Amino acid sequence: MKIAIFGSCVSRDTCEFMDSSYVVAYVARHSVTSLETPHGTGDIDLSGLTSDFQKRMVTSDLEGDGLARLIRAAIDLDLILIDLVDERRGYWLFPDGTTMTNSLEVESCGAARDARRAGARLIEFGSDEHFENWKSGFKLLIDGLQEAKLLGRTILLDIEWAAAVDGAQHPQNDGLSRLGRRWRRLQRGTREASRGLSKGQGVAEALTNLRKVRPTEAEEYADRAAVANEKYIVYREVATAMVPSTVTRASSQVRINRSHKWGPQPFHFRDEDYRSIVQSVLEKAEAVEQSQSDSE
């Protein structure tokens, strides 16, 4: 099966669990806003990137050619997968109205710093400004796929961020559970403050440390997922309405893979999660193929 991806690790990692699959086009590090208002490469220094793949992906974003790359591969495609992971870091809006996705690569090579110095603003995921511009860019993507007769072969991976690692229970987000987490964090802070006082630390410093007590790893994952999934709601509502075929997983249905090859993240899942997603993708693809056969 020949596949194209407009998205990032959720789609990419899913493909690795799909037998006889081959990714012929991979549009990553690319917010849909760049399809409409790409900044261009003229004043962006990517010399700090040592990976050819990273340079290609960031250059593609700056040139806004993600949709064109999918269409060029159309004759070979059996399936297109879309996910929204690359939207999570927002994008840079330059004074001239052009944009650049705020990928990790853009940050690591200094392009984000240079953008700020050039007067660009970071438009954060979940903000009204980001959402409105994302909607326009996403419509452009979907309209382009429709015109190229590719939308029928497109599946949206609507996968929430995992809030717990493999083997742990999904955290509850009701009022009582949140109160319990805050109470446990306060207890840890109290113990740390007491230890500081016993070592001669001043009262003011001990109280400061009490207020700054760090969350546990489990709390950090749960908090990050809760925030991201809350922001994601309005995006998924638009995306699922525009893409005919969608595979959905709630946060409670997936877990973080602590031994994932790219490291544990709320969007890096267990092998069994990917296998389950693949099964759903294949069922959707088979249904589309059957529908097209029936209409001929």
Image (tube, helix red, strand yellow):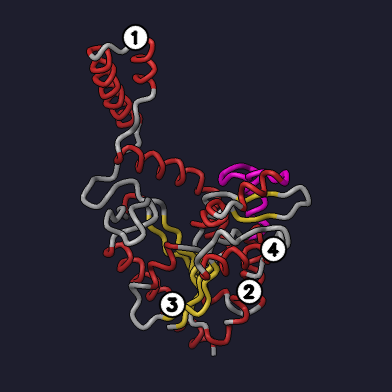
Magenta span covers which residues?
118-137
Mark 3 or mark 1, whichever is nearer to me: 1
Question: How far, Cα to Cα, is label 2 from label 1?
Answer: 65 Å
- Secondary structure of the residue carrying numbered label 1: helix
Tell me what residue is drawn at x 50 percent, y 49 percent: 232
**Res. 19 image quadrant:** bottom left
Apparent side of residue 28 relative to residue 272 in the rendered image (left or right): right
Q: Is residue 121 magenta?
A: yes
Q: Label 4 crowding class (10 Å Cα cut-off): few <14, some 14-19, many 20+?
A: some
Place of residue 262 in the rendered image (x, y in percent of width and height, measured from the top left): 36, 59
Q: Disc 1 marks which amino acid?
A: Val
Apparent side of residue 120 relative to residue 233 in the rendered image (left or right): right
Marks 3,1: beta carbons within 8 A: no
Q: Disc 2 marks which amino acid?
A: Gln
Q: Disc 4 marks which amino acid?
A: Thr
Q: Residue furthest bottom?
A: 296
In the image, is residue 1 above or below residue 265?
below
Answer whether residue 248 is visible to the viewer in this image. Answer: yes
Tell me what residue is drawn at x 33 percent, y 72 percent: 17
Question: How far, Cα to Cα, is label 3 from label 4?
Answer: 37 Å
Marks 3,4: beta carbons within 8 A: no
Question: How far, Cα to Cα, is label 1 from label 4?
Answer: 54 Å
Q: Is residue 70 magenta?
A: no
Instruction: Provide the residue designation for mark 1.
Output: 203
Instruction: Provide the residue designation for mark 2.
Output: 146
Instruction: Provide the residue designation for mark 4.
Output: 41
